[in-house]
Each structure stands twice: as C-alpha cells, then as structure tokens.
Image (spheres, rainbow, N blue to C red):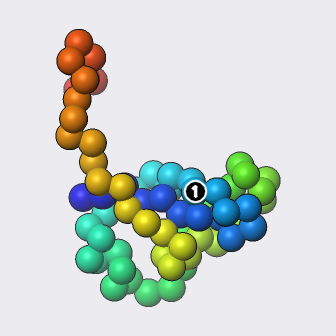
Amino acid sequence: MAQVVTRCRLTGHYMFMGMDVDPKEFTHSAGPFERKFCPFCACEHIWYKEDSKFLAPNSDLRSGVRQAG
C-alpha cells in the first residue's frame, strides 16, 4: 500500500489525502476521487487522480522512537 498525495491545481502544492491504496487499483479507478478542503488555496475543490502521486511507506524506523500500536 502507498499513501496518496495530490497537487492543488491552483497553487501547485501537494497535500496528503489520508488514503492508503494499491497504486494499480487507484490508476484504474474512474474520474475524480475526492472532494476536500485545500489549506493552500483556502477552498474546497475536487482532487483528480491525474494530479496524484504515491509515497511508499517508510520502513526505516529511527532507533529510540517508540511506535504507537
């Protein structure tokens, strides 16, 4: 699974969508995928998968940092 970040079409800033998805399934889904408030342009708009990219989960945990769980 990978985290989805999407670029605001007005400002160009990337925002986390709060989703963990399989990139193959996500790219085959249809149309816009989310309507959400953007803190960068201060408006609510539709987010498109064409403006999205994926961040792989960080498996490199720092020593001495306790994980919630």
Q: Write the residue at 68% across / 70% down.
A: 9
In this view, the residue farthest toward the right is 42
Quarter-wise, where is residue 35 in the image? bottom right
Mark 1: which amino acid?
A: Tyr
Is the residue 25 above or below the residue 62 in the image?
below
Tell me the quarter of the picture where residue 12 sits: bottom right
Residue corresponding to mark 1: 14
Q: Is residue 32 found left or right of 54 in the rendered image?
A: right
**Which residue is painted at 23% across and 12% down in the image?**
64
Front residue of this view, candidates 35 and 23? 23
Residue 18 visible in the current orientation: yes
User: On the picture, is 19 further left or further right than 24?
Assistant: right
Q: Is residue 67 above or below residue 11?
A: above
Name the residue: 64% across, 57% down. Answer: 13
Q: Position of residue 65 (x, y in %)?
A: 27, 17
Q: Image quarter for residue 26?
A: bottom left
**Number of residues whose C-alpha sits closer than 10 Å to that of mark 1, classed few (under 14), some (14–19) or many (20 or more):** some
The quarter of the rendered structure image containing the N terminus is bottom left
Residue 24 position within the rendered picture, expressed as x and y whole percent measured from the top left: 26, 77
Percent of width and height locating residue 47 = 59, 70
